[in-house]
Image: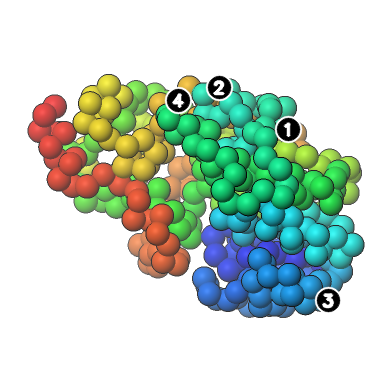
Amino acid sequence: MRLLVLGGTWFLGRAVVEGALAQGWRVTTFNRGRSGADVLGVRAVRGDRTVAADLARLAEHGPWDAVIDTSSTDLAPREVLLAATALRGRVARWVHVSTVSVYADWPHHALTEESGLLECPAGADSSYGWTGADGSPTVYGFQKAGGERAVAQWFGDAAVFLRPGVILGPGEYVGRLPWWLRRAERGGRFIAPGPAARHIQPVDVRDVAAFALDRAASRDGDGGGYNVTHPDGISFEEFVRACVEVTGGSGRPVWTDPETLAEHRVTQWTELPLWRTHAGVWSVSPARAVSAGLRCRPVTDTIRDTWAWLAHQGKPVEHPRWAEHGISPDKEEKILTAL
């Protein structure tokens, strides 16, 4: 199997590369060489995927049986289209890492893989879309929907779109799970967003990578979208308890209702990572993905393995999103005192 990975040096991209090499695949990676070291055993091609000449040079290294695109997070649709155009005829199948944010009803309503998408043209630039007053839809969601359309324009039924919600695990660069682990380790009373029974669906990076590789190897005409979310998930109470247990910390969660958190202007999704009150945020069915072979380890395993990685290695790369996550100690203490 000949695989091209756009990205391939950190978090999901690295997990994809390591999984492919373990299966004996021949792997080419394409990136600028700035965000992490290459995995030993790949053929690394350097270049900027927003530059047509670099993409043309990459295409000369093909053909490949499949490409897995893990590096389009911050790209405009027309930049995704540029890569798809350059690689058509050189790649048989395109596996595109997208997001649940492409759905028009996310995060307000429950979703399936048949739910409607936001509208964005394949040739749109980075200015296309808008963010709603309550934080949805988002410019990001419009942009990613346009990226999907750009790939579909050239690859049709040979295009696969993976739509994860939140990806956690060793090597996480965003800092969601690492923040909870460090907070649990620090000990003392800490705010936990109620209700404690709230169900969440984060998925392990290694399970996303395994499913991406499986879809890359498939030739059954089974393109289209797959919601890569945890089919079982975990309650927030179990999640917090696991963070305390694996760190050996003395943290004591204080479950706080959403109204109180709103009164104190606690920002959802960032100041308390993974907490969001919209009804559909964690109601994303992965039925089609599960039917196609998605298998997810228990979230508690992800928590344990992330702590082991964090305790020995720390942040994989410097990334601005890391600093966005977590409530400040002063603000937390003020809320706890008020309670």
Residue 60: image tag: 3
Q: Which residue is mark 1?
A: 288
Is mark 4 in CB contact (under 8 Å) with mark 1? no
Among all residues in the image, which is located at the extreme left? 337
State which tag comes first along the sequence, 2 or 4: 2
Which comes sooner in the sequence, label 1 or label 2?
A: 2
What amino acid is found at the position of numbered circle 1 in the picture? Arg
Q: Badge 1: few (under 14), some or many (20 or more) residues near its Cα, within 10 Å?
A: some
Q: Please name the residue shown 59% across and 44% down the image.
A: 128
Q: Which residue is mark 4?
A: 278
What is the spatial separation of the Cα atoms under label 3 and label 1, in whole angstroms? Answer: 35 Å
On screen, residue 175 versus residue 7, left or right, reads: left
Q: Give the quadrant of residue 62.
A: bottom right
CA separation, marks 4 and 3? 47 Å
Q: Earlier in the sequence, mark 4 or mark 1?
A: 4
Query: Which of the two residues, 243 or 330, is positioned nearer the viewer here?
Result: 330
Q: Is residue 163 visible?
A: no
Q: Nearer the viewer, mark 1 or mark 2?
A: 2
Q: x, y (%) of residue 237?
A: 36, 31
Label 1 residue SS: helix
Which of 91 and 250 lies nearest the eye of the viewer?
A: 91
Name which residue type carries label 4. Answer: His
Indicate which disc residue 109 carries. Answer: 2
Residues at circles 2 and 4 in contact by the CB criterion of under 8 Å: no
Residue found 70% across the figure and 30% down from its top: 113
